Image (tube, rainbow, N blue to C red):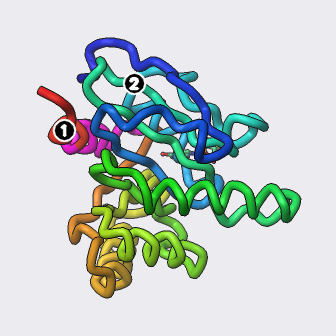
Amino acid sequence: LFSRPAAFLRGARVIGDLPPPDLPEVAFAGRSNVGKSSLINALAGQGDLARTSNTPGRTRELNFFDLDGRLRVVDMPGYGYAKAPKAEIARWTKLIFQFLRGRVELRRVYVLIDARHGVKANDEPIFKTLDEAAVSYQAVLTKVDKLKQAEVAKVVESVGKALAKHPAAHPHVILTSSQTGQGIEELRAEMAAFALA
Ligand code: GDP
């Protein structure tokens, strides 16, 4: 799945721009600056595939990538970013929630959580939406290289507790670092399970 380069397919600003749901999909969501672009780039082994939060424009769309014609990866706009104009925030919030509720091919949403911060109040709306839409999702801790092992264990426990209340959440929390490569192979293997044979 990862042996050939991933290709950027398209960015969607409104729900009508979505590509047809003709491949299984996994999506990546998370608060702005959680390390989503870095993680997608690490997974793909391509440094410049997903743009970082410093790039205006593409980060406020749903960005679709094709992996070997067998799996589509959806990079969702980061949420919880207060500095953008209200109308813009409203537009992409609506896009995120319409997408999550209506996408038949969506197999799993990886909700990225900064290991230093754990689950925050502004992660709850996406959990709630995914529960209501019965879309399977899983917490992925990012930037674990920034913590000591004992601190990682604590945050895994607190994230596990926060997710236990949520019916569509997968109980296993994946630990990653785009910096050290920790967890990248594990996440690739999980994604591969959703791809066409
Ligand atoms: P996005 O807004 O979620 O796409 O976040 P980015 O991928 O742009 O990363 C936000 C910031 O966190 C950048 O300064 C990255 O260098 C940093 N970062 C991302 N992943 C890691 C990681 O695994 N470890 C460390 N130490 N820093 C990271």
- State the residue in front, 39 or 148: 39
Q: Residue at x 28, y 83 (%)?
A: 164
Q: Is residue 85 left or right of residue 92?
A: right
Q: Please say if 12 is above or below 68.
A: below
Q: Tell me the quadrant of the picture where the C terminus can be found.
A: top left
Residue on which disc 1 sits: 189
Q: Please say if 184 is above or below 35.
A: above
Q: Is residue 51 left or right of residue 148?
A: right
Of the four image quadrants, the one with ligand 1 is top right
How many circles with numbers are drawn on the protein? Answer: 2
Q: Is residue 186 magenta?
A: yes
Q: Position of residue 126 (x, y in %)?
A: 50, 69
Q: Is residue 146 magenta?
A: no
Q: Position of residue 67 (x, y in %)?
A: 34, 24
Residue on which disc 2 sits: 66
- State the residue in front, 86 or 189: 86
Q: Residue at x 38, y 54 (%)?
A: 110
Q: Position of residue 87 (x, y in %)?
A: 84, 61
Question: Disc 2 residue type?
Answer: Asp
Tell me the quarter of the picture where residue 189 sits: top left
Categorize mark 2 by other alpha carbons within 10 Å: few (<14), some (14-19), many (20+).
some
* Alpha carbon separation for disc pair 1 and 2: 16 Å
Categorize mark 1 by other alpha carbons within 10 Å: few (<14), some (14-19), many (20+).
few
Tell me the quarter of the picture where residue 134 sits: bottom left
Q: Tell me the quadrant of the picture where the N terminus can be found.
A: top left
Q: Position of residue 169 (x, y in %)?
A: 29, 71
Q: Residue at x 37, y 57 (%)?
A: 140
Asked whether mark 1 and ligand 1 are closer than 8 Å, the reply comes as: no
Residue bounds of the magenta highlight:
180-190
Q: Residue furthest top?
A: 4
Task: Give SS at disc 2.
Answer: strand
Question: Disc 1 residue type?
Answer: Ala
